[in-house]
Image (cartoon, grey):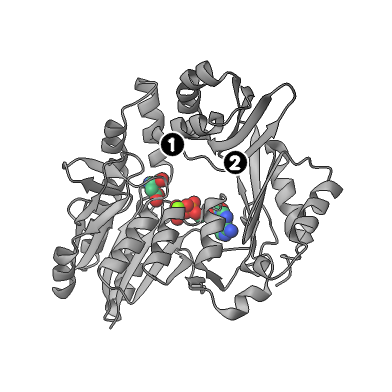
Amino acid sequence: MARIVQKYGGTSVGDVERIKKVAERIKATRDEGNELVVVVSARSGVTNELLARAKAVCEFPSERELDMLLATGEQETIALTAMALHGIGVDAVSYTGAQAGIFTDKVHTKAKIKTINAKPIVRDLENAKVVIVAGFQGINEEGQITTLGRGGSDLTAIALAAAVKADKCEIYTDVDGVYSADPRVVKNAQKVPEISYDEMLELASSGSKVMQTRSVEFAKKYNVVFEVRSSFNHNPGTIVKEEVAYMEKVVVRGVAVDKDQAKVVVSNIRDKPGSAAKVFRALADANVNVDMIVQNVGRQGVANLTFTVPQTETGRVAKVLEPVVAVIGGDVAVLEHIAKLSVVGVGMKTHSGVAATLFQALADAGINIELISTSEIKISVVLDLERADEAARVVHTAFQLDRP
Ligand code: ADP
Ligand code: ASP
Ligand code: MG
């Protein structure tokens, strides 16, 4: 007998037929004598639909109300999944995030999990119930519903796996593992049997939507080994775990593309100590996530600051920077027509020449590089959105990732 946490993403519970299939899978795991906590997402598309409706009634919806609205998506699927299980004779109970004891901080729409009171869930497991938990949501100390950021059901699953001390955590999605690139874009991408937390983290934060970034951070911190696999077949998936020595032999593990970034250029600011600090202090105070940053000093004592932010935050960036440039001078321009391409691999720590190969592959394809940034195990470039998929393919080939 094992204690297992399974998470089913939006496409896995996309309609009633899929929910019935998922119920069958849960039953099969339960019939093997396992204890089971199941986290489900909203049906695919539902969270986006709800967001669109919010925007249709109010240009800048209150984040508290957004959480109230978005949390309903998962509430539908937990109830339906529990009912589908009842229909095939499995004792199951559904819980919202709050009912599952998931306590978060107060930051609406991207709350962090602070604690989980897993006692009631454990009691249910001991009473042979399958526990179905709504992904992506929790409750803060004021009793308000919060959500955990897009893709947050992954985090719910990993955090619950840690809280109930699960033997196994399985993330079921519509691909049978983590690939060397998004298989929808790069047709000959290869499945990776095992990947380190750090590589998965960099891929996720660079746009590989297969796992939510914060869920991988959490898994690394609490050493939750998990498997990404498909709910549409029984293929073995990808195990995500602590780095082991052999992993460094592979220089580049994968290529990721992020099309949800925007480039902000603050040009002609006074080139004085404190200008950059003022810009980024204002953004930090507004909870804007800044990623790549480049500063170049122009002529006549003015400088340009260029950085990337998530597209969802561009409206706020413009507002936040207005009073800042009134003080330090300069003009703000937001450009959304960009993409960020990254190559990731722990092998970069010990191999050289990765940047040269990357830049050459892009040069050979005639693709221009706008910004560059590097970390120990990642190199990212910003390029034209239109050429992003092509760039992913040529880079994937250049690093010979299409070989099994
Ligand atoms: P879910 O709804 O189950 O959470 P997501 O849509 O969030 O599923 O994530 C699965 C998708 O992630 C896949 O359909 C795939 O297109 C995309 N994806 C992006 N990069 C990768 C990658 N490197 N490996 C596997 N899938 C990837
Ligand atoms: N339903 C949420 C979203 O679409 C959470 C999730 O699916 O993980 O982002
Ligand atoms: Mg997801």
Answer yes or no: disc 2 within 8 Å of ligand 1: no
Amino acid at circle 2: Lys
Q: Residue at x 61, y 67 (%)?
A: 346
Label 1: element kind? helix
Q: Which quadrant of the structure image shows residue 334? A: top right
237 with respect to 355 (left or right): left
Q: Are marks 1 and 2 in contact (CB under 8 Å)?
A: no
- The residue drawn where x is 46% and y is 18% is 323
Which residue is pictured at 69% across the width and 57% down the height?
187
- Tell me which numbered mark, 1 or 2, is placed earlier along the sequence: 2
Q: Is residue 295 above or below residue 302?
A: below
Q: Which residue is mark 2?
A: 259
In the rendered image, is residue 247 in sight? yes
Tell me residue 43's x, y (percent).
38, 47
Q: Residue furthest bottom?
A: 1
Q: Which amino acid does the dot numbered 1 rest on? A: Ala
- Up the image or down, 32 lies above or below 367; here it is below
Residue 302 on image: x %, y %: 67, 24
Mark 2 packing: few (<14 Cα in 10 Å), some, or many (20+)?
many
Residue behind mark 1:
284
Is residue 156 or residue 185 the one in the foreground?
156
